[in-house]
Every structure is written in C-alpha cells, then in structure tokens.
Image (spheres, helix red, strand yellow):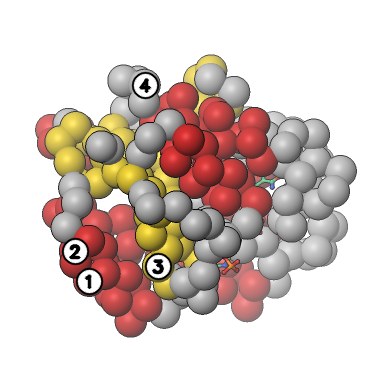
Amino acid sequence: MKTVIVTGASRGIGLATVKKFLAEGWFTIGTSTKGKVDINDKNFVSLALAYPDEKSIDAAIKNIAKIGRKIDVLVNNAAIALDDIGNDLDTDKLRETLEVNVISTADFTIKLLPFLNVPSHIINISSMAASLGDPIENTWHTPAYKISKTALNMFTRTMARQLQPKNIIVSSLDPGWVKTDMGGPEGERIPEEAADDIYKLAISKVETGKFWLEGKERGW
Ligand SMILES: NC(=O)c1ccc[n+]([C@@H]2O[C@H](COP(=O)([O-])OP(=O)(O)OC[C@H]3O[C@@H](n4cnc5c(N)ncnc54)[C@H](OP(=O)(O)O)[C@@H]3O)[C@@H](O)[C@H]2O)c1
C-alpha cells in the first residue's frame, strides 16, 4: 500500500485530496494546525502541523517516523493568504506569508527527505497568482501571497535539481480558482476537481521541475 502525506488536510483542497487518495487505496497522513481532520478511516492518520512553529514541524516529523512507513507522495498544500485583494504590499504580511508558505514548507520537506521512498513525488500546490508571465494588472492583486507562490515555484525548481539524482520528482501544481475558504464561494472549480488533478499528477512519471494545470504543463 502506497503512502501519501497531505499538509493542510482539514478543509478545502487538502481535505478533498485526502479523500481521493483514500478512495484510491493509499495509506494517507493528513495534517492540520490543531491535528484534527474529520475523517474516520483505518488507513488515515491525522497529525498536528502548525507553520511556522519549528517545534511543531519537528514533532510532526517524529510522529511520521513513528508511523514507520516510507512516503511515496508529499503534497505541500498548507498555505495562508493574508492580503485583502487590491491592498498594497504590507511587509508584516509578507514576512508571515513567506514564513508559512515558503520557509516552513521547505523546512518540513527537507526534514521529511529521509522518509521518502525511491522513486517518490513532491507536489507543491502553487497558484496562478505565482505567474511571472501574466500582465501586471491581471488577476487577484494579493501581493504577499503572490510573492510567496512565485518563491514556492523556485523552491520546486531548486529541489527538482537537488533531488533528480535520487529519483524524486518535484512538481508545482496550479489548482485553478477553487471554491474553498481561501478561494471564496465564487471559485470556478470544486475541491474534488483539484484533488483529481493532484492525484493524477502524483501517479504520473512526469519530467521533474515543471508547473502543471489540469493535467498540462503550464508556463511559469
Ligand atoms: N482556493 C483557491 O482558489 C486556490 C487557488 C490557487 C492555489 N490555492 C492553493 O491551494 C492550497 C489549498 O488552498 P485551499 O483553498 O484549500 O485553502 P483553505 O481552505 O484555506 O485550507 C488551508 C489549509 O491549510 C492549513 N493551514 C492554514 N494555515 C496553516 C499553518 N499556519 N500551518 C499549517 N497548516 C495551515 C489549514 O489548516 P487549519 O484548518 O488547521 O487552519 C487548512 O487545512 C493552498 O496552497 C493555496 O494557496 C488555492
């Protein structure tokens, strides 16, 4: 039985992703800040993981070690979006957003490397907000969040290079605009559609270091 870890599994895209992997017969570990995920399944374990608290990251890694399974897929899904749309860049929000969406995500990933299977796949949930190619007036003006997701994409690229010799694929995935607490009720997709994309990418032997949207490579 293969094993996946999904961070930020208590709601939205993360919760739908956990349900998808369980339905496909995977042993599934899901995290939330309080350690509670509303799923009752013998193949599911929930863990507390509250970024940017380093002690929480270390405790989660210890708990994963105790579970004693090699990890086939890591979905780095947990994130925050603190900006109000249209606001100017706020340095405090930028610092907090980078701590959670980038630095803690990197810390957790690096500490998890000894537990990854070979081959395995790390999927970083990015966003259209990361785009460097869109006109500057386009989409959601959420400066701190956008900067964090662009940085996350470069984390994908650098880890892809680092882990290529170890046969570990690292991908970024744009889930589209999804109806969740973060995406709001007007989102164009439901979390289950994003979860299907994540699952399909997870089981595909794709080229490492790429950015994906709805099953197709997309531009950075
Ligand atoms: N929704 C969209 O339209 C959209 C579009 C593009 C990209 N995304 C990306 O997709 C991913 C999931 O988004 P979503 O819309 O499903 O978000 P969401 O509904 O707000 O859920 C966020 C998840 O992340 C966890 N989380 C929040 N703060 C955390 C922290 N400090 N430490 C650890 N975990 C934390 C939450 O756990 P708690 O319940 O414990 O707080 C929750 O499980 C994110 O990476 C987001 O940037 C979303």
Real-space Cα separation, disc 4 to disc 2, in angstroms: 26 Å
Element on which disc 2 rests: helix
Give the mark nearer the N terminus: 3 vs 2: 3
Q: Identify which amino acid the numbered label 3 is placed on.
A: Leu
- The residue pinned by badge 1 equals 62
Relative to 202, residue 88 above or below: below
Please name the residue shown 33% across and 45% down the image: 27
Q: Quadrant of residue 118?
A: top left
The answer to whether marks 4 and 3 mark residues whose Cβ atoms lie closer than 8 Å is no
Whether residue 51 can be seen here: no
Give the mark nearer the N terminus: 4 vs 2: 2
Q: Identify which amino acid the numbered label 2 is placed on.
A: Ala
Real-space Cα separation, disc 1 to disc 3, in angstroms: 11 Å
Residue in front for this viewpoint, 36 or 54: 36
- The residue pinned by badge 3 equals 47
Element on which disc 4 rests: loop
Where ligand 1 lies, by image quadrant? bottom right
Element on which disc 1 rests: helix
Q: Is residue 148 left or right of residue 1?
A: right
